Amino acid sequence: MALILGLESSCDDSAAALVGSDRRVLAQAVVGQNEAHRPFGGVVPEIAARAHVEVLPGLIRQVLAEAGKGIDDVDAIAATAGPGLIGGVMVALLAGKGLALASGKPLIAVNHLEGHALSPRLADPALGFPYLLLLVSGGHCQLLEVRGVGDYTRLATTIDDAVGEAFDKAAKLLGLAFPGGPAIEALALEGDAKAVPLPRPLLGSPEPHFSFAGLKSAVQRAVASGAHRPADIAASFQQAVIDCLVDRTRRALAVSDAPALVVAGGVAANSAIRTALAGLAAEQGRKFSVPPAWLCTDNAAMIAWAGAERLAAGLTDALDVSARARWPLDEMADKVRGAGVKA
Ligand code: KG4
Ligand code: ZN
């Protein structure tokens, strides 16, 4: 059994975790920054980076203490090295380099997206390669074939906004608190999903790409009209997103023979989205897997687990490895307009 210390600071969550290669999460801690960013309705990079510097060292001490371990008990240190807000990414990566240098343990520079992509295998020991991954987060909306550690083929991505970004923008238009995903999900429970006619961008188009910008504009018009209850707009918006995700994923399943459909990333914490995709997998005769909600939103257990998978594959990094703001999982995929840098 290898013990991995995972570190994460690429967006607005500082996190540390100790995870075993036997899938045991010995300790994990996440400190978010929602209060700090709330007045601005989105993540402010400078505020985020400063907060990571203040919080991360304490989290590392905390998880080691909770697990009753010292740095000498750790077999490798896995730190997110991108993609993300560069000032933040550097905090965990530099902390990881410092700990690796001081302890003589190997450093593993983890792609945050690979953390999300492999997280379902931490939760589900029976999930083998390959699988079709719907990666839905604040910065990404992609369909990827995951064939092995470091072996990803992107089938589709968003041509404008990421799906989490669409939730956050719709929430802002509705006057809901940041982050918007959980706020919309809660409000949608009280609304009628058929009440407000909203578009389903790219529905039925042959390539399984995504688009959410037009949906956001339609929400803006619905709010401005004053004709609808906010709960009805929230429910109708969430349903439009679900219809797009299901249609686009069905299209990708038509060209992928992967036996399992897997959903990961912050937006996968949404129950209605999980239920809809489980239904799609059943309809298509595929196994379905989604990590528990705490493992969907940003955390360091997924980074430690990606580290465990990379360590088992003999993949460690030199201490001069660079932080990267942009770092696609599939480096061969065509650039598509839009797609943001954070995960
Ligand atoms: O993966 P993540 O924690 O952070 C990065 O983007 O790296 O994803 C955060 C995104 C935010 O846009 C947030 O609004 C969305 O995930 N999110 C949700 C829910 N919980 C978080 N979206 C819809 N429903 C939710 N319950
Ligand atoms: Zn993320």
Image (cartoon, rainbow, N blue to C red):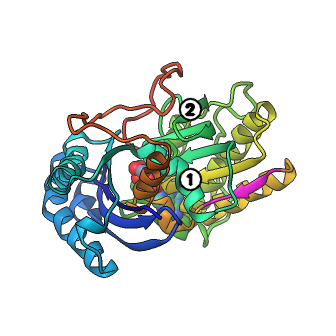
Magenta-colored stretch includes residue 127 = no
Residue found 47% across the figure and 24% down from its top? 331
How far from the left and from the top, in percent, is residue 42? 30, 51
Q: Are marks 2 and 1 in contact (CB under 8 Å)?
A: no
Residue 233 is situated, as x and y percent measured from the top left of the image, at 57, 57
User: Which residue appears at 48% of the width and 56% of the height?
Assistant: 266
Q: CA distance from mark 2 to mark 1?
A: 14 Å
Q: Amino acid at mark 1?
A: Ala
Q: Is residue 32 above or below residue 220?
A: below
Magenta includes 288?
yes
The disc placed on residue 92 is none
Residue 193: x and y, percent?
A: 68, 60
Seen in the picture, residue 190 relative to 259 is either above or below; the reply is: below
The type of residue carrying mark 2 is Thr
Residue 280 placement, left or right of 70:
right
Query: Residue at the spot x=78%, y=46% of the render?
Result: 259
Q: Which residue is mark 2?
A: 157
Mark 2 or mark 1: name the one nearer the start of the chain. 2
| Magenta stretch prevailing secondary structure | strand
Relative to 120, is 25 on the left or the right?
Answer: left
Q: Nearer the viewer, residue 315 or 146?
A: 315
Residue labelled with disc 1: 264
- Report the span colored magenta: 286-290
Q: Residue 36 at x, y = what percent?
A: 21, 62
Which quadrant of the view contains residue 325? top left
Q: From the viewer's perspective, is residue 268 above or below residue 145?
A: below
| Quadrant hosting residue 175 | bottom left
Relative depth, front residue between 129 and 316 = 316
Q: Residues within 10 Å of mark 1 (few under 14, many from 20)?
A: many
Task: Specify whether 318 is left or right of 196.
Answer: left
